[in-house]
Amino acid sequence: MKIKKVFKRILLAILFLVVAFVIYSLIPRVSHSSSSFATDLKKSNVLSKNFQEDLRLFTQDTATKTEVVIALKDNEIIFEKGETEKLINLHSARKSIMSLLIGIAKEKGLLKLDESLESLGIDESKTPLTKQEKTATIKDLLMARSGVYLQAEAEVQSAKDNRPQREQYKPGEFFFYNNFDFNVLGVILEQKTGKSIGEFMEEYLAKPLGMQDFSSSNVVYNSPWPIPNKSLSDYPAYWIFMSARDLARVGSLVAQNGEYYNKQIISTEWLEESFYPYSRMSDYNIDKNPLDAYGYLWWLDTDENLIWADGYGGQYLLIDPATDLVFVQRNFTGNSLMSSGLFLMDENRDSSHKLDLQHLYERTKKYLVE
């Protein structure tokens, strides 16, 4: 009898742990919250229903993986598919948002691009920076040319495989897509503004744009999922969860030279500086990638004069300032341990290609011209 009781207790304990784990795995990393500044995006009928259906069929039958798409022209929705209100991790597209935030902070006199890592007190406790590395400036970080080649949080395997030797290049001398640069920029922004990334973004980007789904709690640190990252770096990655429709507003802001409904939110001068092709991708590009240059945390297609933000899993923002066309593509990569695990188990999780979004853009542009 005693053995049966012990066995029963063990089973109950196991059952309790399983239930507790399932409940924990379903807890979302971020959640929607109502805001006082949200405004609805207007809708336009500039595209015929038949043409919109053609675009929708392309995303379903031809495109590799396209869960959510929204397109704006002149601040108005001209096409949408999927849950455009869903909060999804931007992954590396976060870096383009950081470019805007750094620009806003600069224009408010809170930081200067020529400030060095040494003057900012940036160092690593486990692998201290050298004297040369400490001369890197905020501008070098924005260009991904810091010359600091250390392990960074949330870096991809290609960064590990292709990382130059320490001091192989001086700051400003060589482009290397390096999460050290991007993560440190987040720390600098918080240090110089006295606000968290989420707080600064909410105050100076989300509110002026009337974002419907963003709050400061949408920015999380370290791991985007409820499991810790292990890194030798002192500087955490920051992850921005945004909806497709809110990201599209950012695209409209950029397309309209920093203006949104007749209000200047960020200067045209900063955007022009941000979209200068500081680095050419001839030795960095991958097959069928339309992007050939890099500015301040923005990818550039200089042949077509297009601006891109690009994130893992198919998080794309395409901006055509000449026509005020903005296209956004999003794929859900998880917002809880359970949903993240299901995403990571998907063999096609990163099969989405930006050429599919470019195809939608080109067809739409042609339609509007004809």
Image (cartoon, rainbow, N blue to C red):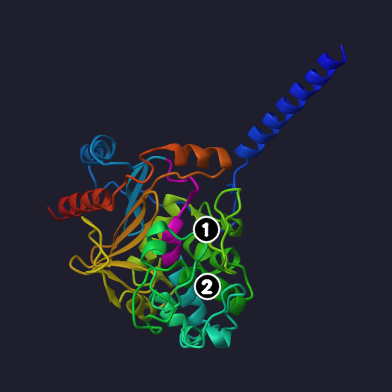
Which residue appears farthest toward the top when viewing the image? 1
Q: Quadrant of residue 285?
A: bottom left
* In the image: residue 45, left or right of residue 222: left
Q: Quadrant of the N terminus?
A: top right
Dot 2 surroundings within 10 Å: few (below 14), some, or many (20 or more)? many
The residue depicted at 42 percent of the width and 51 percent of the height is: 245
Residue 208 drawn at (x, y percent): 50, 66
Residue at mark 1 to residue at mark 2: CA–CA distance: 13 Å
| Residue type at the position of mark 2 | Val
Q: Give the side of residue 240 with respect to residue 193, left or right.
A: left
Q: Camera-side residue: 331 or 247?
A: 331
Residue drawn where x is 59% and y is 79% of the image: 192
The residue indicated by pointer 1 is: 239
Label 1: state its secondary structure: strand
Q: Is residue 313 visible?
A: yes
Q: Say which element carries label 2.
A: helix
> Along the horizontal axis of the image, is 125 left or right of 346?
right
Q: Which residue is mark 2?
A: 184
Badge 1, how many Cα within 10 Å: few under 14, some, many 20+?
many
User: Is residue 299 located in the magenta-colored stretch of the structure?
Assistant: no
